[in-house]
């Protein structure tokens, strides 16, 4: 089955700096890669996603890049703010799998004021 | 995200007891999912259902059971056979297997005393 590895497990940045979180996946058939943000004690919420037919997608301060050849994808957050502090999860899924998501282990991002 | 609810928010169970976690959605979604979340780990899929009266095991189904008698409801029973049931349980739904985005409920924190 699919295996998703996520790094780093913790990340601290100064407010205004950029943050990058990286994930690798094992199944070359995976074609959908969402990123979820989870604040303490709350539900995960989708912040951005990318499909395998695109290499990059941006939404304001957030961007995701995908390298299908290397089977890795990354989340980039620019101009970080304290409210960006949360746990971020990457995931992967493929067609024909009932859209099961395989999640990475999460990255605790702390933005220091 | 207000269209998917879980109850109770906190649940305490004695060893040897079965407990049932509720998940309801009014989003008219066909697919529903149950995940378990442990500290320092990503979400792991327990069971999923693509349509009423049908459900499939996920990666960690042992010790759990589900039913899908109504489109809106997908309850999860944690049985006494589950060796380490203390965790945060998240329910999710999506329009259907052709649609990627999963919407999560607020979660139930189960503690075995």
Image (cartoon, helix red, strand yellow):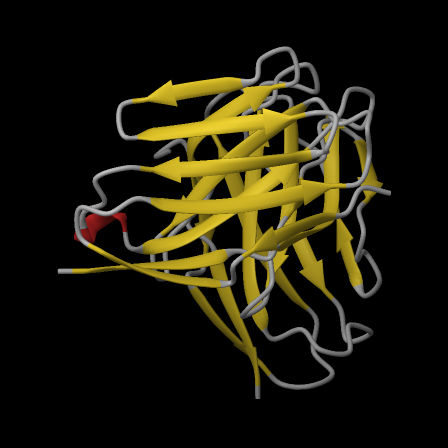
Q: Residue at x 26, y 23 (%)?
A: A60
The answer to whether B22 appears left or right of A112 in the picture is: right
Above or below residue B105? Residue A106 is below
Residue A2 appears in the picture as rendered? yes
The quadrant holding residue B70 is: top right
Above or below residue A48? Residue A25 is below
Which percent across, then down, holds residue B17?
A: 69, 78
Tag count: 0
**Quadrant position of the C terminus of chain A in the picture:** bottom left
The quadrant holding residue A39 is: bottom left
Q: Residue at x 77, y 47 (%)?
A: A3
Above or below residue A106? Residue B30 is above
Residue most extreme to the left:
A113
Q: Nearer the viewer, residue A3 or A39?
A: A3
Which percent across, then down, holds residue A18?
A: 30, 44
The answer to whether A65 appears left or right of A4 in the picture is: left
Q: Nearer the viewer, residue B2 or A10?
A: A10
**Quadrant position of the N terminus of chain A in the picture:** top right
Residue most extreme to the top:
A53
Which percent across, then down, holds residue A20?
A: 42, 45
Above or below residue B89? Residue A65 is above
The quadrant holding residue A42 is: bottom left
Residue B75 appears in the picture as rendered? no
Q: Residue at x 55, y 45 (%)?
A: A22
Q: Residue at x 58, y 67 (%)?
A: B38
Q: Nearer the viewer, residue A38 or A30?
A: A30
């Amino acid at each position: 089955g699919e295996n998703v590895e996520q790094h780093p497990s913790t990340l601290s940045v100064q407010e205004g700096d950029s943050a990058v979180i990286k994930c690798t996946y094992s199944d070359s058939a995976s074609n959908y890669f969402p990123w979820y943000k989870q604040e303490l004690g709350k539900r995960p919420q989708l912040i951005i996603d990318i499909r395998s037919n695109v290499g990059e997608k941006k939404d304001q301060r957030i961007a995701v890049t995908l390298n299908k050849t290397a089977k890795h994808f990354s989340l980039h957050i620019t101009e970080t703010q304290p409210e960006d502090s949360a746990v971020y999860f990457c995931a992967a899924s493929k067609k024909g799998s009932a859209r099961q998501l395989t999640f990475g282990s999460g990255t605790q991002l702390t933005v220091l004021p | 995200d207000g269209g998917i609810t879980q109850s109770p928010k906190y649940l305490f169970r004695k060893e040897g007891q079965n407990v049932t976690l509720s998940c309801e959605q009014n989003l008219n979604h066909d697919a529903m999912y149950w995940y378990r979340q442990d500290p320092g780990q990503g979400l792991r899929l327990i069971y999923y259902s693509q349509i009423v009266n049908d459900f499939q095991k996920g990666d960690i189904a042992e010790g759990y059971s589900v039913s899908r008698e109504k489109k809106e409801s997908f309850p999860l029973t944690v049985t006494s056979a589950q060796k380490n049931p203390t965790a945060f349980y998240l329910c999710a739904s999506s329009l259907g297997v052709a649609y990627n985005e999963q919407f999560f409920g607020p979660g139930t924190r189960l503690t075995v005393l």
